[in-house]
Amino acid sequence: MTGTEVLRTEHREIKIMLKVCNISASRIQNGDLAELDTIAKAVDFFKDFIDGCHHKKEEDILFPLLIKKGTPEQNASVSALLDDHMQGRELTKLINKNLGELQNSVGDTALLASSITAYTDLLEKHIAKEDHTLFNITESIINPDEQQHLYEAFELLEEEEIGAGVHEKFHHMIHELAHKYKLKG
Ligand SMILES: [Fe+2]
Ligand SMILES: [Fe+2]
């Protein structure tokens, strides 16, 4: 697998989780509090996998490489993508806060549902920008050795940041949720 293939594969997993969250958000909007469990799992995934692992691979390894090689246009698109990551972090905190309040019976289902869909909208658009533009550019400007180097750097980061077995745990969780919500996982 090449470096960009690793990130594209992770996007496919993230997109399944976003679909689960959209279904869950509309059920929460209709008052189904049994769905809070799914959102608690999703928040762990957003924090530990999306932000702590996937976005870190992009921010610490891929984006600096592109900035080093890139044109001002590419640098501008990297900076827009970094803004998306920051907004995602803020929305994750908001979802967590709204979730905590509902778990303590003082929250608002509409507020939680809208913070979830704000996050899923942001991430769906963000992933489309990376899959259809940024990664295509990356694949056209870096050579096989650099792809191999990216892959190895991603592996190392994963080992150091989230540790052995954690990605597998999330992988398993996504497939269970895909099955529960009748999505193709
Ligand atoms: Fe990203
Ligand atoms: Fe990404």
Image: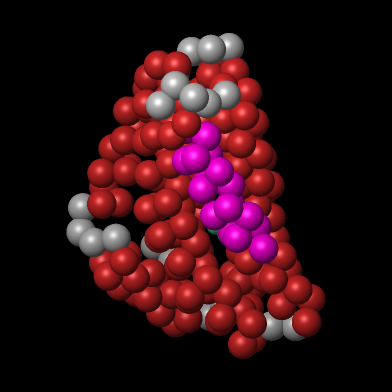
Asked whether residue 105 appears in the rendered view, the answer is yes
Range of magenta residues: 83-99
**Residue 149 place in picture, x, y as percent:** 40, 79
Q: How many marks?
A: 0
Q: Residue at x 48, y 13 (%)?
A: 32
**Residue 152 quadrant:** bottom left
* 57 versus 112 height, above or below: below
Q: Residue at x 40, y 26 (%)?
A: 104
The image quadrant where one finds the N terminus is bottom left
- Verify whether residue 168 appears in magenta: no
Give ligand 2's quarter of the image: bottom right
Q: Residue furthest left?
A: 164
Q: Is residue 71 left or right of residue 18?
A: right
Q: Residue furthest front?
A: 106
**Residue 18 place in picture, x, y as percent:** 53, 36
Q: Residue at x 42, y 51 (%)?
A: 47
**Residue 102 place in picture, x, y as percent:** 47, 26
Q: Residue at x 67, y 63 (%)?
A: 83
Asked whether residue 184 appears in the rendered view, the answer is no
In the depicted view, which residue is nearer to us: 171 or 142?
171
Considering the whole magenta stretch, tell me its main secondary structure. Answer: helix
**Residue 13 place in picture, x, y as percent:** 45, 43
- Verify whether residue 90 appears in magenta: yes
In the depicted view, which residue is nearer to us: 9 or 171?
171
* 123 versus 182 height, above or below: below
Q: Is residue 164 left or right of residue 24?
A: left
Q: Which color mode does the image show?
A: secondary structure
Q: Residue furthest bottom?
A: 68
Q: Is residue 63 left or right of residue 73?
A: left
